Structure formats: C-alpha cells, structure tokens
Image (cartoon, helix red, strand yellow):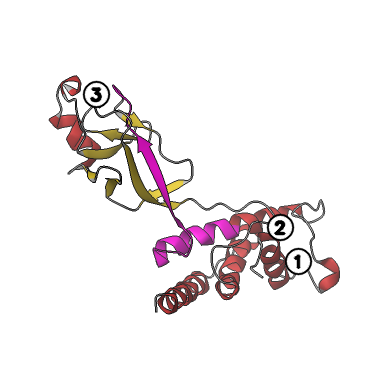
C-alpha cells in the first residue's frame, strides 16, 4: 500500500523523536499539542518534493495533458490549474494534425516583433506565456474559421500535499529515502541547524531510486 502524507508525517516525526513508539502515532494532521511540528513537517515534505522534481526531472505520474480550444478573437488562454511547467514545446491538434510551436525568444520577442498585434489574425503557429497574467498567448488571433480547434499540450503537474490521505506519486522506498532530508528541514525550522550534505544526499538517493524504477518499467 502506498504511503500517505499522514504515514510520512508519522515516520518523520518519529525520526526527530517528537513521536516515540506507536502510542503517539497521529491519526489526523490536527493535534493541538504537536500542531507546530506537524505543520513544519507538511511544509518540509512539500519542499523536498519540489527539490526532488528539479533533481530527478521526471517523476512517475507527474505528467498530464492539458488543452486549449481556439475562440474567435481570443489570443490568450488559461493554463490548466495544476500546471507547474509546460514540458512539451509543441502543442498538437490531434484532429487536424496541426501544431503550435514555442515562439522563438518567448514573450518579449513576440512583444517587440508584433508592433501592431491586432494585425495578426488567422491560424496561429506559435505560443508563448504572457508573464503578466501567466496565460498562453498565441501569435495570431483566431477567426471564426479556426474557432473550435483543440490543441493538446503536456505539462508537469504541480504537486502540493496537504491532506492526510494524499498518496505519494512514487514508491514507498523513495519516501523512506527522503525522510533524512525532511528531518534536516525540520531541524532548520525548529533548531536552527541544517546539514546541507545530508539533505542533498537524501534527495540524490531518492532521485536514483526513481530513475531505477523507471528504467525497469520501460523493459
């Protein structure tokens, strides 16, 4: 059975000796006497997961698909609510076999090169992200002819765990590898001491474990 966040909090609180033995094991993430420690541990787990994403690059079950549907006269579109990073530079219209490519130079280049944006209409070819509102911006405003076309993109999901029953998107062994790193975050917040080497070793060990699991799954 996959570890839940509650399981991980109990394991890490045992590691820092806030919990000793099974008698003090938490059944929820609410406990007035230990709430500060629980909150720090929840923060620590989310912090180390974020760092693990950046180290391992790809975690099991972290990739998802999003879509945008062209609307006449609309150049900007909302991203999926849980987007962390758009991992595919190309959007695909899987019905018509057409593509949207990442705009060379990004938003700033589009801003400079399109001195009169209203003049750019028709079937879009490129996309970028508007840093002002975090929406996808297309190089052309679709007309009624292009309206309704659906483009699919891949993205890495933002993972933030804050409910007791939430399960980790990787094996229990990886969770175990991360406990030492979580302990270091707790020490930093609670005792103002932090072993960077131990923290980095914990993440590196977990990243290796993930890569080995993925390699086996590909056979």
- Label ID, residue 37: 2
Work out whether 213 lies above or below 31.
below
Q: Is residue 203 left or right of residue 154?
A: right
Spatial CA span between label 2 and label 1: 8 Å
| Furthest-front residue in this view | 95
Instruction: Using the image, tell me which numbered label, if any, was put on residue 18.
Output: 1
Question: Secondary structure under badge 3?
Answer: loop
- Lower position in the chain sequence, tag 1 or tag 3: 1
Q: Are marks 2 and 1 in contact (CB under 8 Å)?
A: yes
Residue 116 picture location, percent across and down: 15, 21
Q: Image point 34% across, 53% down: which residue?
A: 87
Question: How far apart are labels 1 and 3 at the CA level?
Answer: 62 Å
The residue sitting at 59% across, 60% down in the picture is: 45
Precedes in sequence: disc 2 or disc 1 = 1
Q: Which residues are magenta?
A: 44-73
Q: Quadrant of residue 59?
A: bottom left
Disc 1 packing (10 Å; few <14; some 14–19; many ≥20)? some
Query: Is residue 4 placed above or below 176 in the rendered structure?
Result: above
């Amino acid at each position: 059975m996959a570890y839940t966040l509650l399981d991980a909090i109990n394991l890490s609180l045992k590691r820092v000796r806030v919990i000793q033995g099974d008698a003090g094991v938490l059944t929820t993430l609410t406990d007035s006497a230990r709430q500060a420690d629980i909150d720090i541990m929840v923060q620590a787990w989310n912090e180390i997961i974020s760092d693990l994403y950046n180290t391992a690059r790809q975690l099991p079950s972290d990739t998802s698909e999003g879509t945008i549907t062209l609307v006449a006269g609309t150049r900007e579109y909302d991203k999926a609510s849980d987007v962390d990073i758009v991992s595919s530079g190309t959007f695909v219209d899987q019905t018509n076999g057409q593509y949207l490519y990442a705009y060379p130079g990004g938003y700033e280049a589009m801003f400079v090169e399109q001195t009169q944006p209203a003049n750019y209409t028709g079937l879009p070819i490129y996309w970028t992200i508007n840093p002002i509102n975090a929406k996808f911006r297309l190089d052309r405003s679709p007309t009624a002819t292009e309206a309704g076309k659906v483009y699919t993109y891949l993205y890495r999901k933002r993972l933030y765990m804050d409910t007791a029953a939430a399960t980790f998107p990787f094996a229990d062994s990886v969770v175990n590898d991360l406990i030492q790193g979580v302990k270091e975050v707790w020490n930093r917040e609670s005792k103002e001491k932090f072993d960077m080497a131990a923290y980095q070793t914990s993440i590196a060990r977990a990243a290796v474990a993930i890569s080995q699991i993925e390699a086996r799954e590909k056979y």
